[in-house]
Amino acid sequence: MLSESEQKRLADIEAALRNDTRFVNGFNRAMSRRVTPRRVAAVLIAVAAVTGAIIGLAAGSVFGTVLAICALGVAGGVWTYPSAQPQQPATHINP
């Protein structure tokens, strides 16, 4: 249980966060993330790259291992590259 002063402090913090549009927009973007074909492709590339690296290491193939590690980098790039379609920032948050 929170004391009265802690409850008042918490209410002040919540009010300040509601008025902080940068925080609200960031929170809304994080909550609206969904599975996209690009992310699925990135995960598939990463799984194939890790599998390829393990097989390359087991077979003693330096070229195969380096190629698999490069593919892992490509997967990371596909995952983090920004979308070509800009997202519209949220104007408000529903309590």
Image (cartoon, rainbow, N blue to C red):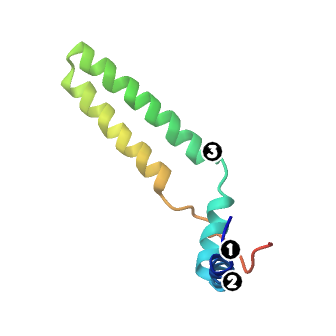
Name which residue lies at 38% across and 29% down.
Answer: 50
Q: Which of marks 2 and 3 is nearer the N terminus?
A: 2
Q: Is residue 20 above or below residue 1?
A: below
Q: In this view, does 26 lie above or below 68?
A: below
> Which quadrant holds the N terminus?
bottom right
Of residues 12 and 65, which is closer to you in this image? 12
Of tags 1 and 2, the one toward the viewer is 2
Name the spot of residue 74 as percent of width and height, x first. Answer: 39, 45
What mark, if any, has residue 15 been given in the picture? 2
What mark, if any, has residue 51 been given in the picture? none
What mark, if any, has residue 37 been given in the picture? 3
Image-based side of 62 in relation to 21, left or right = left
Disc 2 marks which amino acid?
A: Ala
**Please, what secondary structure does the residue beneath circle 1 have?**
loop
Q: Is residue 43 above or below residue 12?
A: above
Of tags 2 and 3, the one toward the viewer is 2
**C-alpha span from label 2 to label 3:** 38 Å
Residue named by callout 1: 88
Name which residue lies at 59% across and 71% down.
Answer: 26
Name the spot of residue 6 as percent of width and height, x first. Answer: 62, 76
Of tags 3 and 1, the one toward the viewer is 1
Q: Earlier in the sequence, mark 3 or mark 1?
A: 3
Name the spot of residue 43 as percent of width and height, x first. Answer: 51, 38
Q: Residues within 10 Å of mark 1 (few under 14, many from 20)?
A: few
